[in-house]
Image: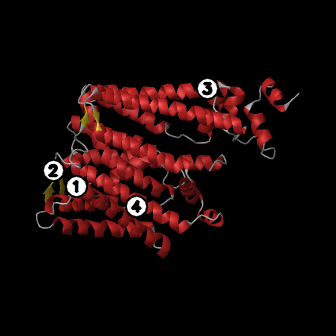
C-alpha cells in the first residue's frame, strides 16, 4: 500500500501529525504543525483544532481588533443612528487614509523592533515642500509631488544611515528628526505660515474626487474577488504539482466569499453617497502592494528575519545595514505621502501640519491593528484595521460632542490595552514555545 493511499485511509489526529513531524517533542507540548496539512488530513475539524491551539498559545492574530471594531460600531450606532450612515462611513474612510498611509510605513520599522518618531514632522515637511513648489513657485504639480515624496524618502534614508551605519539608537535619531524637521517645515512655509493649495489640482483631489458611476465600486470589488480566486487557485495547482500542502477548494471558496462580502459591502455603502473615493482606492492599492512586498519577496523575508534576530540574520548573510536603511527610507516615503493626503484634506499646508496627535495616531494605528512592538510580527493590512478603529472612535465621539481631551484619553486607553494584549500574547507564545 502506498504512503499516499495509507494517509487517505487513516484519519490522522493533530497530535499524531505533530508527533510524526517532531518525534522528540514532549507528549504534553502544544502541537505546532502546518495548518494546511491539518486541513488536508482532517477537513473542517482541522481548522477548529488549529484555531483552538492558536488561542491556547496566545496567537490571537487580528481577532481582538476585529471584535473591538464591531463593539465600537455597535456602541456608537446605538448612541447615534447617523454613525453607520453612508455619508459618515465615507467620511471616515477618506479621513483615515492619510494616517493609514503613514502607518504602513511605520509598520516596516516596527517589524524590526524599532520606532520612528519623526513621521509627523516629515509629513509636514512634505506638504510644505509641495505647496511652496507648486503654489509659490508655479512648478508643475506632478514634479512638486515627486519632489515632496523624494524628500521624505531622503529624510528616511538619513535617519536609517545614522541608525544602521553609525549605531545611534533609532529612538534618539528620530526624536532629533522630529524637532529638526518641524523647524525645517516652519522655515519652508515662511512668515505667512499657511499656503493654500488648488482644491481642483492633483493633490487637492486626492481626498475630494469620487468615481460617481456605480460600476466603478462594484467593478473594483469584482476585480479584487476574481483576482484573489484565480491567484489562490493557481497557487494551489503549483503546490499540488510540487507535492507540498495546499488548501482545499472549499477553503478557497470560503475565503473568496468572505472577500466578496468585505468588498461589495463597502462598494454598496459608497454608492449610496457620492461614489467610490479615489483616496480609498489608492490606499487599498498601497496595502496590497506592500503586503506583497513583505510576504512574497526576499526583501520582505529579510525584514521579518531581522526583526526576529539581528545576529541570526547577520550570520545568514543578510545585509543588516542595507535592510535597516531601506526600512527607514520606506517609512519616510509613506510619511511624505501621508503628508500630501493631509494637505489635500485641509486644502493647505500650514504650521500645524504633522503636529497634535498625528504621531500618536500613526503608531496607535499600527499597533492596534496587530503589529507587535517587539518586532517580527505584523502585516501592512494591520494599518487598515488599526486606523479604522482610531478614526471610528474619533468620529463617534465627535458625533456625541465629546471634547478633544476626552478623545485623547480614550484613544490612549485603547492603545494601552492593545500593548498589554501584545505583551501578554508574547509571553504566552514563549511559554508555549511558539515565539
- Per the model, the C-alpha gap separating discs 2 and 4 is 31 Å
Q: Dot 2: few (<14), some (14–19), or many (≥20) neighbours within 10 Å? A: some
Q: Which mark is residue 141?
A: 1
Q: Which mark is residue 198?
A: 2
Residue 207 quadrant? top left
Q: Dot 4: few (<14), some (14–19), or many (≥20) neighbours within 10 Å? A: many
Residue 54 coordinates in the image, percent (x, y): 61, 38
In-image side of 259 versus 316 (left or right): left
- Per the model, the C-alpha gap separating discs 1 and 4 is 28 Å
Q: Which is more foreground, mark 2 or mark 4?
A: 2
**Element type at marker 3?**
helix
**Element type at marker 4?**
loop
- Cβ atoms at labels 2 and 3 below 8 Å apart: no
**Element type at marker 1?**
helix
In-image side of 9 versus 174 (left or right): right
Q: Which mark is residue 116?
A: 4
Vertical order, 122 against 391 (above or below): below
- Per the model, the C-alpha gap separating discs 3 and 1 is 48 Å
Q: Dot 3: few (<14), some (14–19), or many (≥20) neighbours within 10 Å? A: few
Q: Dot 1: few (<14), some (14–19), or many (≥20) neighbours within 10 Å? A: some
- Cβ atoms at labels 3 and 1 below 8 Å apart: no
Q: Earlier in the sequence, mark 2 or mark 3?
A: 2
Q: Earlier in the sequence, mark 3 or mark 1?
A: 1
Q: What residue did someone put label 3 on?
A: 249
Residue at 75% of width from left, 40% of height from top?
28
Residue at 15% of width from left, 50% of height from top?
198
Amino acid at each position: 500500500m502506498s504512503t499516499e493511499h495509507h494517509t487517505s485511509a487513516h484519519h490522522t489526529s493533530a497530535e499524531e501529525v505533530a508527533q510524526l513531524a517532531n518525534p522528540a517533542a514532549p507528549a504534553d507540548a502544544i502541537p505546532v504543525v502546518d495548518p494546511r496539512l491539518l486541513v488536508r488530513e482532517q477537513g473542517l475539524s482541522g481548522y477548529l483544532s488549529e484555531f483552538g491551539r492558536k488561542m491556547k498559545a496566545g496567537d490571537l492574530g487580528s481577532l481582538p481588533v476585529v471584535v473591538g471594531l464591531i463593539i465600537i460600531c455597535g456602541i456608537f450606532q446605538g448612541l447615534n443612528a447617523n454613525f453607520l450612515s453612508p455619508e459618515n462611513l465615507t467620511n471616515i474612510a477618506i479621513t483615515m487614509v492619510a494616517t493609514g498611509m503613514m502607518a504602513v510605513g511605520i509598520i516596516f520599522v516596527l517589524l524590526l523592533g524599532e520606532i520612528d518618531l519623526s513621521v509627523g514632522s516629515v509629513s509636514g515637511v512634505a506638504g510644505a515642500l509641495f505647496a511652496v513648489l507648486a503654489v509659490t513657485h508655479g512648478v508643475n504639480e506632478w514634479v512638486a509631488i515627486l519632489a515632496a515624496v523624494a524628500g521624505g524618502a531622503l529624510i528616511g534614508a538619513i535617519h536609517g544611515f545614522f541608525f544602521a551605519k553609525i549605531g545611534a539608537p533609532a529612538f534618539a535619531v528620530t526624536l532629533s528628526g522630529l524637532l529638526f524637521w518641524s523647524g525645517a517645515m516652519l522655515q519652508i512655509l515662511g512668515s505667512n505660515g499657511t499656503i493654500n493649495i488648488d482644491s481642483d489640482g492633483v493633490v487637492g483631489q486626492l481626498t475630494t474626487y469620487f468615481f460617481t458611476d456605480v460600476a466603478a465600486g462594484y467593478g473594483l470589488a469584482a476585480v479584487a474577488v476574481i483576482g484573489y480566486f484565480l491567484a489562490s487557485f493557481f497557487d494551489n495547482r503549483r503546490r499540488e504539482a510540487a507535492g507540498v500542502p495546499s488548501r482545499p477548494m472549499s477553503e478557497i471558496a470560503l475565503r473568496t466569499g468572505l472577500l466578496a462580502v468585505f468588498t461589495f459591502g463597502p462598494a454598496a455603502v459608497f454608492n449610496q453617497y457620492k461614489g467610490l473615493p479615489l483616496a480609498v482606492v489608492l490606499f487599498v492599492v498601497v496595502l496590497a502592494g506592500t503586503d506583497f512586498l513583505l510576504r512574497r519577496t526576499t526583501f520582505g523575508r529579510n525584514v521579518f528575519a531581522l526583526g526576529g534576530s539581528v545576529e541570526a540574520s547577520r550570520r545568514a548573510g543578510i545585509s543588516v545595514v542595507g535592510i535597516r536603511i531601506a526600512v527607514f527610507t520606506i517609512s519616510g516615503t509613506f510619511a511624505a505621502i501621508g503628508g500630501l493626503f493631509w494637505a489635500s484634506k485641509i486644502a493647505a499646508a500650514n504650521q500645524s501640519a504633522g503636529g497634535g496627535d498625528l504621531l500618536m495616531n500613526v503608531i496607535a494605528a499600527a499597533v492596534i491593528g496587530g503589529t507587535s512592538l517587539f518586532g517580527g510580527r505584523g502585516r501592512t493590512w494591520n494599518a487598515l484595521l488599526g486606523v479604522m478603529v482610531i478614526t471610528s472612535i474619533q468620529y463617534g465621539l465627535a458625533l456625541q460632542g465629546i471634547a478633544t481631551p476626552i478623545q485623547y484619553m480614550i484613544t490612549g486607553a485603547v492603545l494601552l490595552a492593545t500593548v498589554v494584549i501584545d505583551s501578554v500574547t508574547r509571553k504566552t507564545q514563549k511559554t508555549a514555545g511558539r515565539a
